[in-house]
Amino acid sequence: MTEHYDVIVIGSGAGGGTLTHALAPTGKKVLLLERGGWYPREKENWSSMSVWGDLRYRNAGRWVDQHGKEFNPKQHYYVGGNTKVYGAVLFRMRERDFHDVYHVDGVSPAWPLTYGDFEPWYEKAERLYHVHGERGVDPLDPPDADDPADLAAHSLDFWLTTEDLPLPSNRVEVERGGRIKLTYEPTNLEAHERLVAKFRGFLDPIQCTQMVIDRSTYLGGRLGISGVAHQNGTVRFGTDPSSSALDVTCRMHDVDNLYVVDSSFFCSSSAVNPTLTIIANALRVADHVTTRL
Ligand SMILES: Cc1cc2nc3c(=O)[nH]c(=O)nc-3n(C[C@H](O)[C@H](O)[C@H](O)COP(=O)(O)OP(=O)(O)OC[C@H]3O[C@@H](n4cnc5c(N)ncnc54)[C@H](O)[C@@H]3O)c2cc1C
């Protein structure tokens, strides 16, 4: 390659796309590389059977688990990345998620930065992605048991999430030949069962309990290991190079000009969807990179 670029961004999802957007006004020469093509616009976009039944848009090939069993991962290589198909649920992590959180199975480790460090970037991220909702009302609150009539009038899907702890043995490897291997053991199941039991308790008064779908089923299929949509933590940030690959600006400890802005930098997964934190962090890192250009 003979052309010169000031910045090369690999991947056009929430991380890379947001970083590129934030660096564009610098006037520097930015190249965005994306392995996937354009997401097709077609009538099947609107068909639940095509999207969830036939998995028409999953195109990351076959991955393999620790037992050698192949699966079709919930991954999408397109311009826009998984962010092209995601649910657009954009939550901030809670203040406590940035500290050690103690669970039955172990500790969800603290991040090297606090909620306060991320707050201004969350604010910008929410504005950029037009996040809306009522401030001050916890969106994870269980349904209002005082108003069963309102609840019963609607069919509702609920997605209950609890935190997965970062086990060193849960990892991603690239096999000879390039196939991706995932080793994954679920953690924190006791907390999950308690949450499900509590949730079912809220639904009891409206005789809705039998409608709660078990955690391992998703529209009749198994979620299991292929539900990798919220993966994170493979290239953690931190102050200590012996336990992290990135410094707090998300730059590789040992490489002066290599930054990582997808969810790999997470130290823990928290129990909320990751993308708003990915976006906020990409804006934070873009601000830092801009000062260096
Ligand atoms: C069905 C679904 C629903 C979801 N719903 C939500 C939700 O409601 N809320 C939420 O917060 N999160 C949700 N997620 C998760 C969310 O989509 C991801 O957290 C987010 O997209 C990750 O952004 P990213 O930039 O890190 O990676 P991605 O969006 O995955 O983008 C990475 C990009 O890099 C490209 N790429 C990879 N390797 C290379 C290479 N070697 N060279 C060039 N390009 C490469 C890929 O093709 C891809 O386009 C959902 C995910 C799925 C699949």
Image (tube, rainbow, N blue to C red):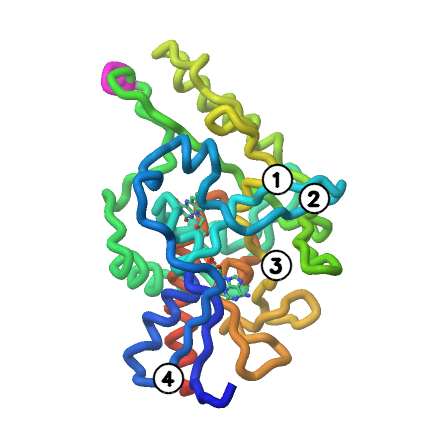
Q: Are marks 3 and 1 in contact (CB under 8 Å)?
A: no
- Report, in whole angstroms, how far the alpha carbon at label 1 lies from the one at label 2: 8 Å
Q: Which residue is mark 1?
A: 225
Name the N-terminal-most of marks 1 and 2.
Answer: 2
* Dot 1: element: loop
Residue extent of the magenta highlight: 146-151
- For the residue pair 123 and 175, the one nearer the viewer reads as 175
Q: In the image, is 169 to the left or to the right of 7? A: right
- Report, in whole angstroms, how far the alpha carbon at label 3 lies from the one at label 1: 16 Å
Q: In the image, is 121 to the left or to the right of 193? A: left
Mark 3 is on which residue type?
Thr
- Report, in whole angstroms, how far the alpha carbon at label 4 lies from the one at label 2: 40 Å
Q: In the image, is 197 to the left or to the right of 84? A: right
Name the N-terminal-most of marks 4 and 3.
Answer: 4
Q: Which residue is mark 4?
A: 29
Q: Residues within 10 Å of mark 1 (few under 14, many from 20)?
A: some
Mark 2 is on which residue type?
Asp
Q: Which residue is mark 2?
A: 65
* Dot 4: element: loop
Q: Which residue is mark 3?
A: 234
Tell me the mark number nearer the camera, choosing from 4 and 3: 4
